[in-house]
Amino acid sequence: TQLLEQSPQFLSIQEGENLTVYCNSSSVFSSLQWYRQEPGEGPVLLVTVVTGGEVKKLKRLTFQFGDARKDSSLHITAAQPGDTGLYLCAGEPQGGSEKLVFGKGTKLTVNP
Amino acid sequence: NAGVMQNPRHLVRRRGQEARLRCSPMKGHSHVYWYRQLPEEGLKFMVYLQKENIIDESGMPKERFSAEFPKEGPSILRIQQVVRGDSAAYFCASSPQGADTEAFFGQGTRLTVV
């Protein structure tokens, strides 16, 4: 059972465009994290959101946690080639055993 | 402060051999998680350990796979009698407490079974 559904699976855009990546679930999460992974490397944590409705900004990246804590989005403004990578959302299911469950990821390519 | 260290980075094994993957958590971290990642896929949880204890191994195959996190030394993920389907990237993450604190990942071990 895939608890976290990410969309789109693949995204190829031109430099300067905006984009939004979605992470959806029917389950409630205590917290949700976004990671970026480059080829041959481990995931690097970008942000953790904990409160329903929370919005966090990291330079050109805006992260939002849904009011019901079941979904999240990542919005990138004026994408740059350096943003290319695999974006993964991960969450700790409420009442779970403290393990993170991951979505399959969105593979983003930003063309110069 | 060194990050999560995994070794080896690349491991090639013939079918039927044993694979041992090591993970040294960040200093001060007592919680270790192992994940497996297939190409073009997200990470799949395998096992969650604290020092000397397995807390959750619900994602680990019942046969051939085992994990430990001894009082001294790194966490070890052991795969006996490897098969081609075991080929994947195996990532370890550590945190100071449970997953409600931030988990940091190592660079992974890429296992290839030939």
Image (tube, coloured by chain):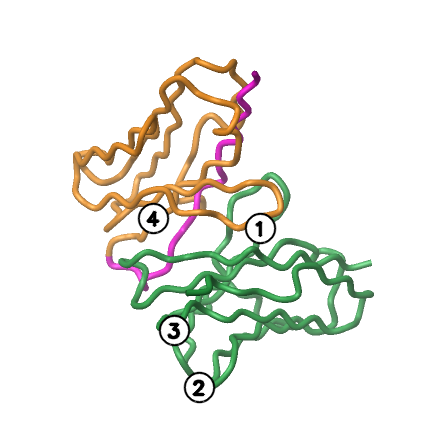
Quarter of the rendering containing residue B71: bottom left
Q: Earlier in the sequence, mark 2 or mark 3?
A: 3
- Using the image, name the chain to which the residue with label 4 belongs: A
Q: Earlier in the sequence, mark 1 or mark 3?
A: 1
Mark 2 residue type: Lys
Q: Which residue is mark 3?
A: B55
Q: Which residue is mark 4?
A: A91
Mark 3 residue type: Ile
Secondary structure category for the residue under label 1: strand
Nearer to us in this view, B86 or A80: A80
Q: CA distance from mark 1 to mark 3?
A: 21 Å
Q: Which residue is mark 2?
A: B71
Mark 4 residue type: Gly
Secondary structure category for the residue under label 3: strand
Mark 1 residue type: Gln
Q: CA distance from mark 1 to mark 4?
A: 17 Å
Secondary structure category for the residue under label 4: strand
Q: Which mark is residue A26?
A: none
Q: Position of residue A65 (x, y in %)?
A: 24, 36
Question: What range is drawn magenta here?
Answer: A95-112
Q: CA distance from mark 4 to mark 3?
A: 18 Å
Quick one: label 3, few (<14), some, or many (20+) residues within 10 Å? some
